[in-house]
Structure formats: structure tokens, C-alpha cells
Amino acid sequence: MSQTARPASAREQELLERAYRYALDQGLSGLSLRPLAAAIGSSPRVLLFLFGSKDGLIKALLARARDDELDFLARTRANDQGAGSDLATAVRLTWQWLSGEPTRPLLKLWVEAYARSLIEPDGPWAHFARQTVEDWLALLTEVQPQDPNAATAMAERTLALAVLRGALLDLLATGDFERVTAAIERYQRLVAPQQQPRDPGPAS
């Protein structure tokens, strides 16, 4: 018989939120339970009781970070529908969020978890990189005009995601907002004419 996960208690949710804010500031790679517990008003014993292990806590923190990502994706879908649905618009709206100063801590955490999931595929980071790629491709699929050539459509989505991911890494490394944003705008100008809805041809 499969076991149903118990719902999180109010205390567990409160400590997870505090731990998440701590992780956004300090990162996850060197996470140690004792300083974390002291910073959030708890103890290692309580954290181990609530989350089972340090790996269990890291998994919970990664899930919390993904909640923020999915919330953004939902808002992007809604905004894109109002602005005109295409990949260029989705890239523009996404870059506005990615490049904002308030988002930087989350994105640094995302980059850290992405890299660790590739290096330690069997640890608490497992599948994080693949999952986030799938999340973003799902968004781009929803906003992309229909194309009868499935392979071409997938290539266009993958290119859009690669441009955003590369621009994000560049921005985090250099802080050169103007240069990187100019590259995003150049990409939009290049692809926008190709992403108009396909003309179905004259009615018979």
C-alpha cells in the first residue's frame, strides 16, 4: 500500500520559509544545519525531525524555489496572452523578470542547483536541471504559434530557452545589463518576423 505524504504543519512551513530566505542569501552548497538553525530560530534536532535529513531539507528548499519559478511562469502565460502570443513576446517578458535585481538571489540559487544536479545526479539535487528545462519549454510551447513542422517548432523553443539561459549566466557573471539586454532585443528582432501565425491560405 502506498503511503500518502503527511501535510506540512504550520511550524514546518514557517521554518521552511525562513530557511528558504536564508538559502537565497547564503546559497546551498555549503549549507550546514547548525548555523542555519541558529539563523532561523530553530535547532538541528527540530530540522531533522521535520525534514528527515539534511538532504530532505535541501529537497524541500529546491521545491520551494521551484514554486517561485512556476508562479512566475503562470504570470508570464497570463501576461503573454494579453500582449500577443509568440516566442519573442515571451522572451521579452521573461527577460524583464530574469534581469530584475529582486530576482537575482533566486536565480543564483537556480544556477547553483542546476549545476549540482549535473554533478551529483543521485543526490538531493537529482533531476532539478531536467525538470527546470521541461518547465520552461512547457511555457514556450503554450505561447508559440502552431507550426505543422513539430521539429522546427521544438528547435525554435529550444533556441529561445538557450538564449535566455545564456543571457542569464552572462548577466550574473558580469552585471552588464545594457549589453546583455541589447543581445536579447537583437534576438527578438531577428525571430519576430518568423513567428507570426502561419497563413492557412485562401478558404476553399
Image (spheres, helix red, strand yellow):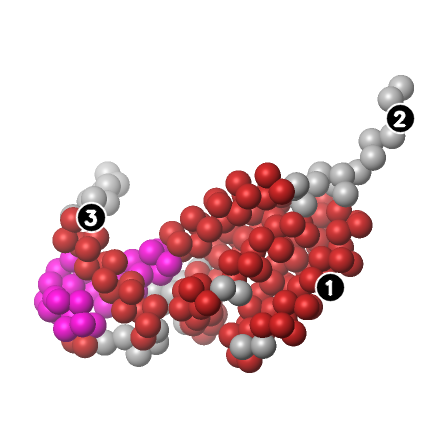
Q: Looking at the image, is mark 1 or mark 2 earlier in the sequence?
A: 1
Left or right: 193 as drawn, with respect to 19 = right
Nearest to viewer (mark 1 / mark 2): 1
Q: Residues within 10 Å of mark 1 (few under 14, many from 20)?
A: few
Element type at marker 2? Answer: loop
Q: Which residue is mark 3?
A: 8
Q: Residue at x 19, y 59 (%)?
A: 15
| Residue 198 appears in view | yes
Circle 3/circle 2 CB separation < 8 Å? no
Q: Which residue is mark 1?
A: 186
The magenta stretch spans which residues?
Answer: 36-65
Q: Residue at x 21, y 53 (%)?
A: 13
Q: Residue at x 42, y 64 (%)?
A: 102
- Residue 204: quadrant of the picture: top right
* Residue 29 picture location, percent across and down: 34, 76
Which mark is drawn over residue 98?
none
Circle 1/circle 3 CB separation < 8 Å? no
Q: Residues within 10 Å of mark 2 (few under 14, many from 20)?
A: few
Element type at marker 3? Answer: loop
Element type at marker 1? Answer: helix
| Residue 130 appears in view | no
Residue 47 colored in magenta in the image: yes
- The foreground one among 140 and 113 is 140
Residue 61 colored in magenta in the image: yes
Q: Which residue is mark 2?
A: 202
* Residue 170 picture location, percent across and down: 58, 75
Left or right: 78 as drawn, with respect to 63 = right
The span from disc 1 to disc 3 (Cα, nearest Å) is 46 Å
Query: Taking 144 as reference, is 39 above or below it?
Result: below
Q: Looking at the image, is mark 1 or mark 3 earlier in the sequence?
A: 3
